[in-house]
Image: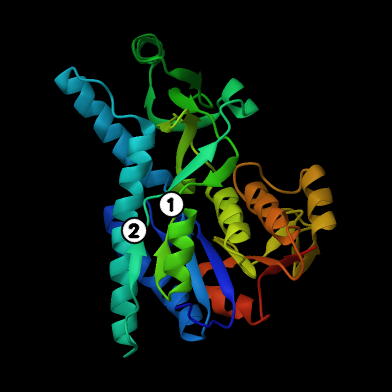
Amino acid sequence: MTKKFKSKIVIALGGNALGNNLKEQMVAVKTTAKAIVDLIEEGHEVLIVHGNGPQVGVINNAMTEYAHSTDSDPTPLSVCVAMSQAYIGYDIQNALHEEFLNRNLEVPPIATVVTQIRVDENDKAFENPSKPIGKFMGKDEALAAAGSRGWIVKEDAGRGYRRVVASPAPKEIIELSAIKSMADDGQVVICCGGGGIPVISNGKHLAGVPAVIDKDAAAALLAKNVGADTLIILTAVEKVAIGYGTENEKWLDKLSTKEALKYADDGEFAPGSMLPKVLAAVDFASSGENKTAMITLLEKAKDAINGKTGTKIVD
């Protein structure tokens, strides 16, 4: 039986929602849970996507060290992403459970879906991997790892060498039907963590590939696929700005998709931070009628939905 909601919202949680290590994450998810339950308490259906940058790096480093010490094959990056989805989801689930109880509310079913996302094996991102993953290495160690493990390594801003992987565009959410069924039944679903486990179709088999999918792009794809009304991308600033960090800095309350793309073309948004968020917001907002994307602070999610703050992006 499908439950009735005021609206359907996909939330994309930025790194500030999770912290940078185990201890920080345990603290951060309590604040995160408050923001999410605020929306659920108001009657919205909420699906949650999260990043995994620090977490998957820790897992990848640990598994690489284990492989080195035991002379075994390294754990594939796709498996590390799956591990990060489960353990981040575990913390979010517990924090949400506790927050519902703190408010004397009935605790709905809460579940993490370990989610695969298909990418195109011919995506041009595979031709020029640029996403750093794992530890810094000296040149000799990096070249040895490249030779023995088939890694692509690049020098990183004078700080040493790191493995780099592709960041292809998400094409298909493999577990979509399960996610939709659970959410429509009133369950709080955490999915597409870290942008999803990147896989390609190899006949009947889905094969993991060494790549990292942008979590905001994955959240936009999820929002489109589940028929969401709103995509909220939560980050470290309350609004999007042009001229950021300059004397001409201007915070924006509302943007059309055309304005957002023009600012992006003009280089107003940093490639490693705000640009992918704006592009994901544009992708969703332009996907149909009455679709709204918002970018704001974690703590301001409820205010953004109620039109009090944040940057709204509409077609």
Q: Is residue 144 above or below residue 312?
A: above
Which quadrant of the view contains residue 282? Answer: bottom right
Q: Is residue 105 above or below residue 10?
A: below
Which image quarter is the N terminus in? bottom left
Three-letter residue code for mark 2: Gly
First in residue order: circle 1 vs circle 2: 2
Q: Secondary structure at mark 2?
A: helix
Instruction: Find the residue positioned furthest to the bottom.
Output: 104
Give the number of the disc on residue 209.
none
Q: Secondary structure at mark 1?
A: helix
Locate residue 260 relative to residue 207 in the image: left or right. Answer: right
Residue 101 image position (x, y, % from top left): 29, 84
Specify whether residue 238 is in view. Answer: no
Q: CA distance from mark 1 to mark 2?
A: 8 Å
Residue 170 image position (x, y, % from top left): 57, 42
- For label 1, count other residues whose C-alpha is less than 10 Å away and answer few (under 14), some (14-19) or many (20+): many
Q: Is residue 131 above or below residue 31?
A: above
Q: Which residue is mark 2?
A: 89
Residue 51 image position (x, y, % from top left): 46, 51
Q: Nearer the viewer, residue 221 or 135?
A: 221
Residue 31 image position (x, y, % from top left): 40, 71
Instruction: Find the residue positioned furthest to the left.
Output: 70
Q: Which residue is mark 1?
A: 193
The residue positioned 43% from the left and 59% from the top of the image is: 178
Number of numbered discs: 2
Which image quarter is the C terminus in? bottom right
The residue positioned 45% from the left and 60% from the top of the image is: 179
Three-letter residue code for mark 1: Gly
Mark 1–mark 2 CB contact (< 8 Å): yes
- For label 2, count other residues whose C-alpha is less than 10 Å away and answer few (under 14), some (14-19) or many (20+): many
Q: Nearer the viewer, residue 303 or 88?
A: 88
